[in-house]
Image (spheres, helix red, strand yellow):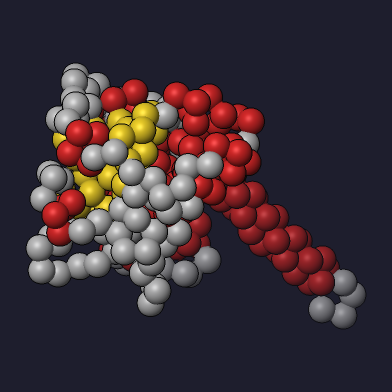
């Protein structure tokens, strides 16, 4: 069983599109997202020249191969699963998922089943009768104005399907510092902080807890632990040098005549 969407089994079905430009733009959206199967049902105007103008040369073959039907039931007949799109909510329009969730739900279904994504006319969308032919509905969340251009809606859903069809690459996790490296760093940091009176020397481990939690959230790598330990060594060297310089200056002052 695959863990990504099989785009070859998914078709975009435009029911009664009124504008040929929207058909062409939808074909272009399919081409952008690696899909090929476009079905048009009872179009109001399917002027080939206007369709191809919006589809551009890249999606011309999708236009040439698209299916045309006069009846929605006939067009949906070969499909095992139909997802309808709707901007209106409530009543009979129970929306089961948003586009991202829809794409994830379709992954196992698309493996051995033909799926249709059904879009209604630009001016009114799918009717209640059309929705009865759907297994599920999807709504594209918007702000105050819920109506999307037909081709825009096609692009949104095709993009989600495309994203779900891509191989999931494992997230890179670098080699983290081992327990031995971290413990050595904590001891060194603790000694330095005690020496500069930043933490209470009587109970240093208690005061170190916050630092331990902080470094744990950072998920330190081995090279970062080495860097912190190097800073600690430099602080230690400099503090010893300052102390030694002060001692020598004090001795020199005592050895001057008059003291």
Q: Give the farthest residue toward the right.
A: 257
Image coordinates of residue 140 in percent, x first then y, are: 33, 58
- Answer left or right for 122 relative to 74: right
Quarter residue 8 falls in = top left
| Relative to 91, 243 lies left or right | right
110 lies above or below 93: above
Asked if residue 227 lies left or right of residue 124, the reply is right
Front position in the image: 105 or 253:
105
Percent across and percent down for residue 164 are 34, 36
Q: Quadrant of the N terminus?
A: top left
Q: Residue at x 31, y 53 (%)?
A: 120
Q: Residue at x 82, y 78 (%)?
A: 259
> Which residue is pictured at 64% across the width and 30% down the height?
57
Task: Identify which residue, 171 or 116, lies in the foreground.
Answer: 116
Residue 117, quarter of the rendered image: top left
Give how far across and how far down residue 202 sits, in percent.
32, 66
Q: Is residue 103 visible?
A: no
Identify the residue at image location x=20%, y=67%.
89
């Amino acid at each position: 069983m695959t863990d990504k969407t099989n785009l070859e089994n998914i078709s975009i079905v435009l029911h009664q599109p009124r504008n040929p430009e929207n058909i062409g733009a939808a074909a272009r959206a399919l081409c952008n997202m690696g899909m090929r199967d476009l079905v048009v049902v009872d179009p109001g105007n399917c002027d080939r020249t206007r369709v191809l103008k919006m589809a551009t040369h890249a999606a011309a073959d999708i236009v040439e191969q698209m299916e045309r039907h006069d009846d929605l039931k006939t067009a949906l007949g070969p499909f095992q699963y139909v997802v309808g799109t709707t901007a209106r909510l409530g009543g009979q329009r129970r929306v089961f998922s948003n586009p991202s969730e829809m794409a994830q739900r379709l992954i196992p279904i698309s493996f051995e089943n033909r799926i249709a994504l059904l879009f209604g006319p630009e001016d009114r969308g799918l009717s209640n009768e059309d929705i009865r032919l759907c297994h599920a509905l999807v709504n594209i969340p918007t702000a105050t104005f819920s109506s999307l251009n037909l081709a825009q809606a096609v692009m949104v859903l095709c993009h989600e399907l495309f994203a779900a069809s891509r191989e999931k690459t494992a997230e890179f996790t670098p080699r983290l510092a081992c327990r031995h490296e971290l413990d050595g760093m904590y001891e060194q940091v603790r000694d330095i902080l005690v020496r500069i009176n930043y933490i209470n020397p009587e109970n240093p481990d208690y005061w170190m807890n916050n630092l331990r939690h902080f470094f744990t959230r950072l998920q330190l790598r081995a090279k970062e632990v080495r860097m912190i330990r190097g800073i600690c060594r430099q602080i230690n060297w400099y503090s010893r040098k300052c102390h030694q310089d002060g001692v020598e200056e004090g001795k020199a002052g005592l050895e001057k005549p008059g003291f």
